[in-house]
Amino acid sequence: MHLSTMKKCPQCPGKVLSPVVTQGQILDTCDLCHGLWFEVGQLEGTWQDAHGHLPPGRAILEQIHSAWGDPLTERDNLLNCPDCDIPMKRYHLSPKFQLELNRCSTCQGVWVEDSQRCATFYAPKVRAALTEINKPANWRTFFFQLLTRLPVEFNMKPRKKPWVNWGLIFINILVFILVLLEPNLYLAAGMIPAHLTQGQGLLTLITYQFQHADFMHLFGNMFFLYLVGDNLEDVLGHANYLLIYLISGIVAGICQWMIDPNSVIPVVGASGSIAALFGMYLLWFRRARLTFMIIIYQVKVALWIFFLIWTVYQVIDMVLAVEGVAYMAHLGGLAFGLLVGWLGYNWVLRQNPILAHLNGPLARGKTL
Ligand SMILES: [Zn+2]
Ligand SMILES: [Zn+2]
């Protein structure tokens, strides 16, 4: 290599960059600080998939590419371009994702510091997810909530098809129809605390989860299962999701049994399992928003505000002891979901880098 073609590390005096194969491209890196040098076009190459296609959110990517926007105004500590040896300018890749990159105005190469490497690779996907979350409510979401009184979800799109969640919804509807045709099934598969106390009907701790007392009970539960289940199945994986769903229902059932072990009223419904899903959803999808309607005014609120209102309703029900509501199953399920959400938080983020970046400091809308 001729000395004149050697690239100098912008951060380490006297260090020369060496070639490295990263994401299918030959880039230059510094062995000392592990920064990466992208020549013009190579950063976009990093964002292409194996077939040379750009990831979802192509329009967003073109936006990033065509409009780097204004450089940050700081004048100190500007790094020098490894090729041109003149100061580079610092840029944010997106106003909502505060990733800082150094770009040379002459050769249009980009220097990525080690701390920003991972975020840089996932930048277009994180930005696509942020765009989904930050979409404004519109007349369609307004009429949906006005007519149904149900919230509209703003969250990242799942990458996988939620087969398990669809299956659970299907079984719930099927069981509901079967019970309409053969009402005796209701008593047979509902969870009766007094029977559990006598050590009978342990299997009903599973079967009770798939039964509903009436259509509104079914409809409300299935709506919320549809809403939160797809994202949870996406980040957990199909099998883990199914397992956690069933265990949540069992734990919720046991909570209900503990508060009233001699009751002979059958407990039914997916509410306990769904309350547990709420807990995990709340802790993992921190940037997601749900709409809340105050009379006819629709607002997007943070999940914790939405679930706080929901929990207050549960507690009021408990105090008033509304007939036929297994409130302890709801609260027990929620507590279990929060526990799983807290214990599993780091594991889930390790499996889902995009979610990790969404929950991380770069996506908070302010400079570090
Ligand atoms: Zn270096
Ligand atoms: Zn340059």
Image (tube, rainbow, N blue to C red):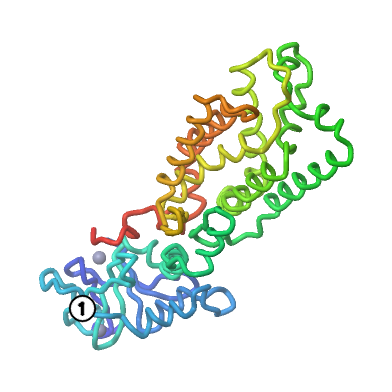
The location of residue 55, given as percent across then percent down, is 52, 73
Front residue of 112 and 193: 193
Disc 1 marks which amino acid? Met
Residue name at image x 50 percent, y 40 percent: 279
Residue lying furthest right? 182
In the rendered structure, the answer to whether residue 292 lies left or right of residue 187 reads left
The location of residue 350, given as percent across then percent down, is 47, 49
Instruction: Give the quadrant of the C terminus.
Output: bottom left
Q: Which residue is mark 1?
A: 88
Front residue of 157 and 45: 157
Count of numbered circles on the image = 1
The location of residue 180, given as percent across then percent down, is 84, 41
Instruction: Give the quadrant of the N terminus.
Output: bottom left
How packed mark 1 is, by other alpha carbons closer than 10 Å (few <14, some 14-19, many 20 or more), is many
Task: Point out the quarter of the image occupied by ligand 1.
Answer: bottom left
Residue name at image x 50 percent, y 60 percent: 156
Front residue of 347 and 242: 242
Q: Is residue 251 visible?
A: no
Helix, strand or loop status at disc 1: loop
The location of residue 90, given as percent across then percent down, is 22, 73
Q: Quadrant of residue 204?
A: top right
In the rendered structure, the answer to whether residue 288 lies left or right of residue 87 reads right
Front residue of 151 and 28: 151
Q: Quadrant of residue 297?
A: bottom left
In the rendered structure, the answer to whether residue 186 lies left or right of residue 147 reads right
Q: Is residue 274 above or below residue 157?
A: above
Residue lying furthest left? 76
Residue name at image x 68 percent, y 13 percent: 262
Q: Is residue 63 above or below residue 31?
A: below
Residue lying furthest front? 295
Q: Is residue 97 visible?
A: yes
Disc 1, ligand 2: is the CB inside 8 Å?
yes
